[in-house]
Image (cartoon, rainbow, N blue to C red):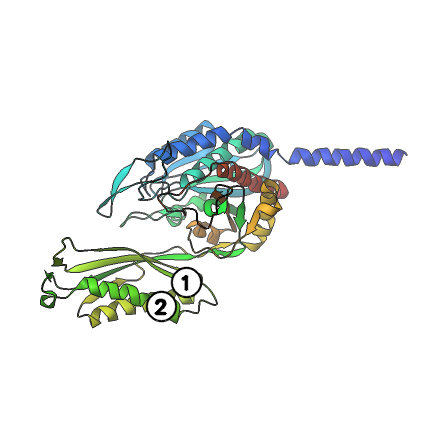
């Protein structure tokens, strides 16, 4: 009998100790939910393009200092902010990352806090909108920082918070984004053993969380093709060389690169033209037309082959029209494939299941979107997951996508994202601490 009582007491003690080691994520998150929503709405209403996130970075830095975090640094990679939370107990080092930049998109959501900001981007007037959800990412990580700081004394290990500018790419002629954050020593001052990030995503419903192990998001590269002809009157096309017709033929012929020259049964490839600029008047055939776009791949050999094929198509088709083409393919250094470390992924998925239930954790296919989180995940093991943004009951496959002027974030995603990032971080710290 005595042995049974001792066993029961030991079991109770172990259970109590385990409970003490596992913080109440729901309570921690609930305490910051209202703030996360307010931050997200404020940032949404005041969006800033890449390397111009001055107001957003100021809001973040002020909050991190108010929490008493250490080593709050600003101006990294132009407008980036980092800070360190040192727990009261020994444990591992991890990094949590959010991006802060908006897009040159004119908002059409009708929200009471919709953006009315305008700017000039690449010579054209446009609105500015958080059409990709980075306002949510920033608000969520600000909330996670506050929740973790509230339990600092019991926290094992250290956490680096990274608020990054220019994930969508820096302005032409500037450096920026994750690669520049790393180049300026973010992981040299604080070397984590794992890095975590999230992205709100229109193709999942609010309440769902998505993940994939291994290669997850595509490599992304930009291209720029300038087709040069000879200007003439629109009534006399034979008097010049029409770069518009040549450019149209390039766009059409380039479709065969994916459909006929790449083995897309093995891995997907995308070549998309995003803008065509040329001409100024209805009856003038212009001197030149500019084509810009993106290439998405998962394999380095396929990536290089598409570069060569697109350059060949541009130059050869232009020549066939009597024009010339200056093809920069790629026109800058792109993002590599985002790879989720398999062992880290296996370790993190149970944390996601604790938050939304196993039935709401979705194993996703390859995502053709790209993320410069890939640079962090090349330095240390990384795990990047997706938080559903489309309201429950709405088909996420037909909902306005990320980057749409009608992209709509169900704010339930803020609660899920805060809890998911907290659970992933705390489970990792406590299991290793």
Mark found first going from the N terminus, 1 or 2: 2
Nearest the eye: 393 or 284: 393
Q: Position of residue 53 (x, y in %)?
A: 34, 38
| Label of residue 177 in the image | none
Residue 300 is left or right of residue 243, and the answer is right
Nearest the eye: 306 or 207: 207
| Label of residue 269 in the image | 1
Badge 2 marks a residue whose secondary structure is helix
Q: Position of residue 422 (x, y in %)?
A: 55, 38
Q: Position of residue 277 (x, y in %)?
A: 22, 55
Badge 1 marks a residue whose secondary structure is loop
Residue 36 is left or right of residue 362, and the answer is left
Neighbour class for label 2 at 10 Å: few (<14), some, many (≥20)?
A: some
- Name which quarter of the figure residue 318 lies in: bottom left
Q: Quadrant of the N terminus?
A: top right
Residue 258 visible here: yes
- Residue in view at x 38 percent, y 56 percent: 220
Q: Do the residues labelled 1 and 2 touch (CB within 8 Å)?
A: yes
In the depicted structure, whether residue 37 falls above or below residue 102: above
Residue 193 visible here: no
Q: Mark 2 points at which residue?
A: 257
Distance from Cα at disc 1 to Cα at disc 2: 9 Å
Residue 195 is left or right of residue 108, and the answer is right
Q: Position of residue 316 (x, y in %)?
A: 25, 71
The number of numbered discs placed on residues in the rendered structure image is 2
Q: In which quarter of the image is the C terminus?
A: top right
Nearest the eye: 233 or 373: 233
Neighbour class for label 1 at 10 Å: few (<14), some, many (≥20)?
A: many
In the depicted structure, whether residue 235 falls above or below residue 19: below
């Amino acid at each position: 009998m005595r042995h049974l009582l001792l066993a029961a007491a030991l079991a109770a003690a172990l259970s109590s100790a385990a409970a003490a080691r596992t913080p109440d994520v729901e309570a921690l998150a609930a305490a910051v939910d209202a703030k996360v929503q307010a931050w997200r709405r404020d940032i949404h209403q005041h969006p800033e393009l890449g390397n111009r996130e001055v107001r957003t970075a100021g809001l973040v830095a002020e909050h991190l200092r108010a929490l008493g975090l250490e080593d709050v640094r600003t101006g990294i990679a132009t407008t980036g902010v980092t800070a360190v939370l040192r727990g009261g107990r020994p444990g591992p080092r991890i990094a949590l990352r959010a991006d802060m930049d908006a897009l040159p998109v004119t908002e059409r959501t009708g929200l009471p806090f919709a953006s009315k900001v305008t700017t000039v981007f690449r010579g054209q007037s446009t609105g500015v909108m958080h059409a990709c959800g980075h306002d949510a990412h920033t608000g969520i990580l600000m909330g996670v920082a506050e929740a973790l700081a509230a339990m600092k004394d019991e926290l094992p290990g250290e956490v680096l918070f990274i608020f990054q500018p220019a994930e969508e790419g820096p302005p032409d002629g500037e450096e920026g984004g994750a690669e520049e954050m790393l180049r300026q020593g973010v992981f040299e001052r604080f070397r984590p053993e794992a890095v975590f990030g999230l992205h709100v995503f229109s193709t999942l419903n609010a309440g769902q969380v998505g993940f994939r192990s291994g290669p997850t998001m595509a490599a992304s590269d930009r291209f720029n093709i300038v087709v040069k002809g000879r200007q003439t009157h629109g009534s006399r096309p034979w008097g010049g060389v029409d770069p518009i017709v040549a450019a149209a033929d390039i766009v059409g012929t380039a479709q065969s690169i994916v459909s006929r020259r790449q083995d897309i049964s093995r891995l997907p490839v995308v070549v998309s033209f995003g803008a065509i600029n040329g001409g100024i008047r209805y009856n003038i055939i212009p001197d030149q037309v500019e084509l810009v776009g993106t290439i998405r791949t998962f394999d380095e050999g396929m990536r290089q082959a598409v570069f060569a094929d697109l350059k060949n198509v541009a130059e050869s088709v232009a020549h066939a029209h009597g024009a010339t083409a200056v093809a920069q393919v790629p026109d800058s250094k792109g993002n590599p494939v985002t790879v989720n470390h398999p062992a880290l992924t296996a370790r993190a998925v149970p944390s996601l299941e604790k938050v939304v239930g196993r039935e709401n954790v979705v194993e996703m296919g390859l995502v053709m979107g790209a993320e410069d989180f890939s640079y962090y995940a090349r330095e240390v093991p990384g795990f990047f997951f997706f938080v559903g943004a489309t309201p429950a009951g709405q088909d996420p496959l037909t909902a306005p996508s990320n980057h749409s002027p009608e992209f709509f974030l169900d704010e339930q995603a803020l609660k899920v994202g805060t809890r998911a990032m907290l659970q992933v971080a705390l489970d990792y710290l406590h299991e290793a601490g």
